[in-house]
Image (cartoon, rainbow, N blue to C red):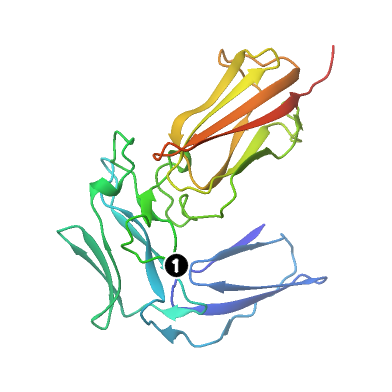
């Protein structure tokens, strides 16, 4: 695999890879990356195209802020291109007020501003160090009281350069198995049970457990943990004692609740398959 990475945020180029048959073509902007199949015969053409546009208000928005890093960590601010074009960032400036504000500026014009404090964090988070604040919606005002939430524990409490874990995904909530059957035998085919979920309410918490068909608790996947608006959980077929669970039918319970007292339970059934001796 050949990987091409651009460092400059100000360059827009187009790559064309002649792989004999077919021709692979892609565009890379800024620090995007792409991969092409490994080959001994390819050529690359670099063409500057479409001059970058001057930054305007509304083009760049604050997406995520970490203001209380863990020991040895650093603060960060993630910005998001909300426009539909490439932008010249050479005039972009970042200011941080001691009162608790992050301000994006360009030519003395305020592009976006977030006023933050520790009270925005989820009230059930005991240690806020290393937990970032993520934007829920790019359509709402930056300082809307509900527009920044603590990054989900299920996402590692911060998602720099990735999609925000609390970004609103839709009004539907669900939890479903990607496959009803899995066989943890190491053959790289359905070795894990995967539960895919989506919740309509950001900053929700969840508990997920695996039970046998007799109702016995087999595995705790998650307990009262903050989750993102979408994600997945996996089970490798190992029980709470670290032993391989027996072949058979298992019940997956996924309970979601929020600070308003709303609760929802999702129940799925899967089969742990394997060879019979």
Q: In the rendering, at what x and y percent does residue 166 appear?
A: 45, 50
- Point out the residue furthest to the left here: 98
Residue 26 or 144: which is nearer the viewer?
144
Describe residue 264's horizontal placement relative to residue 2 as left or right. left
Describe residue 177's horizontal placement relative to residue 276 as left or right. left
Tell me which residue sits at (46%, 72%) in the image.
Answer: 82
Circle 1 is placed at which residue position?
Answer: 139
Mark 1 Cα within 10 Å, few/some/many (few <14, many 20+)?
few
Locate the C terminus and report the quarter of the image it occupies: top right
Tell me which residue sits at (67%, 24%) in the image.
Answer: 251
Describe residue 195's horizontal placement relative to residue 139 as left or right. right
Describe residue 126's horizontal placement relative to residue 6 as left or right. left
Q: What is the count of numbered marks?
A: 1
Q: In the rendering, at what x and y percent does residue 79 appear?
A: 39, 65
Residue 234 seen in render: yes
SS for dot 1: loop
Locate the N terminus and report the quarter of the image it occupies: bottom right
Q: In this view, does 197 lie above or below 163?
A: above
Residue 4 seen in render: no
Q: Image quarter for residue 240? A: top right
Tell me which residue sits at (33%, 35%) in the image.
Answer: 124
Q: Is residue 130 above or below residue 193?
A: below
Q: In the rendering, at what x and y percent does residue 140 appear?
A: 40, 65
């Amino acid at each position: 695999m050949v990987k091409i990475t651009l460092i400059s945020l100000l360059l827009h180029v187009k790559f064309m890879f002649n792989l004999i048959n077919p021709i692979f073509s892609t565009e890379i902007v800024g620090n995007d990356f792409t991969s092409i199949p490994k080959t001994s015969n390819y050529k690359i053409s670099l063409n500057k195209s479409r001059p970058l546009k001057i930054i305007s208000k509304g083009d760049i928005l604050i997406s995520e802020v970490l203001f209380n890093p863990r020991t040895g960590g650093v603060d960060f601010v993630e910005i998001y291109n909300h426009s539909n074009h490439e932008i010249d960032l050479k005039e972009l400036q970042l200011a941080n007020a001691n009162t608790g504000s992050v301000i994006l500026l360009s030519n003395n014009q305020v592009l976006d501003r977030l006023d933050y404090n520790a009270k925005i964090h989820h009230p059930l988070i005991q240690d806020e160090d290393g937990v970032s604040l993520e934007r829920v919606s790019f359509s709402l005002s930056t300082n809307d009281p509900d527009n920044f939430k603590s990054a989900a524990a299920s996402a590692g409490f911060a998602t720099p350069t990735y999609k925000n874990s609390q970004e609103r995904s839709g009004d539907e909530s669900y939890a479903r198995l990607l496959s009803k059957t899995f066989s943890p035998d190491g053959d790289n085919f359905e070795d894990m049970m995967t539960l895919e979920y989506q919740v309509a309410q950001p900053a929700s918490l969840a508990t997920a457990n695996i039970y046998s068909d007799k109702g016995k608790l087999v595995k705790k996947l998650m307990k009262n943990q903050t989750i993102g608006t979408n994600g997945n959980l996996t089970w490798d077929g190992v029980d709470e004692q670290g032993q391989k669970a027996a072949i058979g039918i298992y019940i997956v319970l996924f309970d979601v609740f929020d600070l308003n007292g709303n609760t929802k339970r999702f129940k799925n059934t899967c089969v742990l398959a394997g060879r019979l001796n």
